[in-house]
Image (tube, coloured by chain):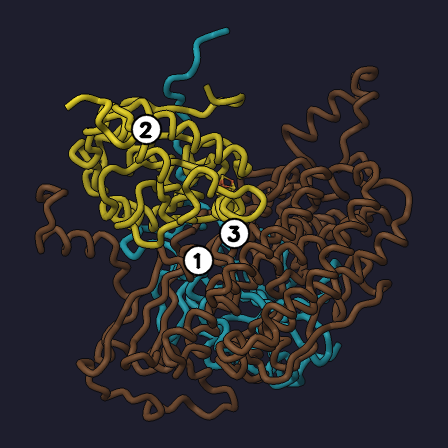
Amino acid sequence: MELPADAPAVITADALRADLGCFPTREQYHDLVAAFKADGFEVCADLCAVDYLEHADRALPEGVTPTRFEVVVNLLSMSRRERVRIRVQAGDVEPEVDSLFDLYPGSEAMEREAFDLLGVIFRSHPDLTRILMPEDWEGHPLRKDYGTGRVPVQFKEAPGPR
Amino acid sequence: MALEDLQHNFLTGRLEDLVRWARRASVWPATFGLACCAIEMMASGAADFDLARFGMEVFRNSPRQADLMIVAGRVSQKMAPVLRQVYDQMMEPKWVLSMGVCASTGGLFNNYAIVQGVDQIVPVDVYAPGCPPSPETLMHAILTLHEQIRTGEIMKRRATGNPVHLDHAESPWTPEVPVAVRLGTPK
Amino acid sequence: MSEPTVRTAERLEALTAETSEGPQELQRREATPASELGREVGSVVRIDDTPFNPDDVDYERADDETMIINMGPSHPSTHGVLRIMLELDGEIVLRAKPVIGYLHTGMEKTGEMLSYVQGATNVTRMDYLSPIINELSYSMAVEALLGIEVPERAVWIRMMMSELNRISSHLVWMATNGMDLGSTSMMIYGFRERELILAFFEKTAGLRLNLNYVRPGGVAADLPDGWEDDVEVICDTIYERTFEYDELLTGQPIFRQRMVGVAPISAEEALALGVTGPLLRSTGVPWDLRRTMPYLAYDQVDFDVIVGTYGDNFDRYAIRLNEIRESVRIIRQCLERMPAGDYRSQDPKVTPPPRARIGESMEALIHHFKLFTEGFHVPAGEVYSAVESPRGEHGCYIVSDGGPKPYRLHVRAPSFVNLQAIPLLMRGASMADAITVISTVDPIMGEVDR
Ligand code: SF4
């Protein structure tokens, strides 16, 4: 598969499922997605974020600086029956990337979800509010430094030993 | 007036028994389907299992007209105030049946998002185990509840107890007689 | 807090405050930014690169002509705990905004704590109408990371079970849709037929819902003895009964009035919003992952992808009804061509040793023990696998760091994305049509909120 000509990013072919993986920087991200859209990727299938707190030194293609948060976008081209995965390093402390809302209106809810659960900020998103958690919730539960919130199981009125 | 003069047969009974009998035979559940268990709850109302046999086929959509809240599924932190509000809107006498492990204890999902047991929010009368409880288990739970109504106190008002509001949830309300449904036939 | 049983104004306010979700809800027009307002009235903005024009929206419209009402989260027609806020002008819906999260279960977090063996138990509870499909996309992702092959028989069993599951899911849809439109008999019929399939599931996997049947490496158990007869009966009965539904609903004037031409969506809008499944196919886009990006053995069976033309409610109904027939067709072919062999991979990495050997050999016992306590290790990497669920593309994105548990488990839930079409579909519809819109979009809240 060819990449749109002027798209700036580090590209690797993902050996696993033969999806193309792209690693743009935060500045290149929006342009790259726009180039893909112009190239026939009609649908933004999925958008999520990952917190790599415990894997700061993970293996990435050369020229990519790993950061704690990563936003992963899966684009789908129906005409060509191809998928492409774009992984943008979103930052360490206050992760922030451009919103894809102007390209794919359907990414709206997914970006809100990534904001709600991982605290990634999407610039120029129309309505960046919490979507799954209650409005007054503190913290972003899918971050790795956010506890699971497990409570120990208690047994009331358990039958005595048999 | 002698009894022979009467034109009709009649039965005598204590008012209490009559009230209990009437209540037991027409418990109207509120639709409070939350998750997977709700599908099983709907299935028990539908053709094969037919809750109508117990006078319970009318699932009321308005809590004002319902006596029994079947909490079918996991209760999230966001849903908890809504659940309490629906419970408060129900008229006395009212009962709560916690269906499935999620509603009873949080089940598989012991995490930040799920209320670990709906009995922290509302008093529960009967717990039905299973994930999801099959319609048979739900019916068993309902029969257990009927038995409880038949033998219970008629003047007890639940809401005058000490309802927990979420902002002072430090004293969780525990039902006086928690009943877990055991497997086997109801007595 | 005032005495709770007394209804004072103060008490009502307290209750409202307790259940309010602040800016997640629909706000008054003057408090809403223009771009957000555009989304709520359902403009799929910038579809052809024309910038969104706030003048398209009656931004100045006085609020006292309209009314904001709240529907849900405990409402009989919202299919679970969906909450929709509507701005109405009389009967006509002007704006709509779904508020979700009332069933947020933290499954993605829980998935990070469960090993790959246990993971299927977790994901199967997301979309509770099609548990097999959830497990399938999860297992396929894990298998892709592990690089193991699934035996032929397991592939065909998986395919047959997912088609059975698709039928049962569409049947529930037919039932609830019937109920929303006031056709209570459809409700009863749908659940009656579904019991046939659930009985077979119970026989095979032991549970009616949330089966945990498809696992990384294969399936949990072989098909029960005599399964051919059971499946044969299911196929025959359901195929015949779809024609009964036809008679009951398809030509019925009241039903048609509420479905034909109501809430149309165009192909461009559908693509821009990323919706998939029957909602997309109703607009005429022939996109079905079973055909376009085949997985399992879907490229070896014969079936048609059903597409609509107008993208309205009726098309979505017709697609689901006909998909039941197509699924029956696939199941019949599975029945004929079911290969013999193993039902799970014999790779010792993912499969425990057979029961008989555990008693004999210490090695086997240790292996069994390790597999179920620690789980197997999966090579580091990340993978996205997608399958066609009854509601659209069900994707599973797994990041592995080489350990026995996923580092990140994300599920692309079709209903979650499809739900974004609701403001668009509801715009200008009447209140009664809003109900049919929710119904034909078919959101499963367990999957939306995860
Ligand atoms: S108990 Fe099981 S079936 Fe019921 S809601 Fe919880 S996970 Fe779903």
Q: Where is residue A73 in the image (x, y as percent from the top left)?
A: 57, 67
Q: What residue type is labelled 3?
A: Tyr
Residue under numbered circle 1: A92
Q: Is residue C388 visible?
A: yes
Q: Nearer the viewer, mark 3 or mark 2?
A: 2
Q: Distance between the residues labelled 3 and 2?
A: 55 Å
Disc 1 element: loop
Q: Colour of chain A?
A: cyan
Drawn side of residue B154 relative to residue C231, left or right: left
Q: Which amino acid does label 1 sit on?
A: Asp
Task: Note the chain letter of the brown one.
Answer: C
Query: Neighbour class for label 2 at 10 Å: few (<14), some, many (≥20)?
Result: many
Q: Position of residue C382 (x, y in %)?
A: 64, 55
Mark on residue A52?
3
Residue under numbered circle 2: B149
Residue positioned 49% across, 53% down in the render = C446
Assign the N terminus of chain C to one quadrant of the image.
Answer: top left
Task: Note the chain letter of the yellow one.
Answer: B
Residue positioned 47% across, 22% down in the render = B186
Frontmost residue, C57 versus A79:
C57
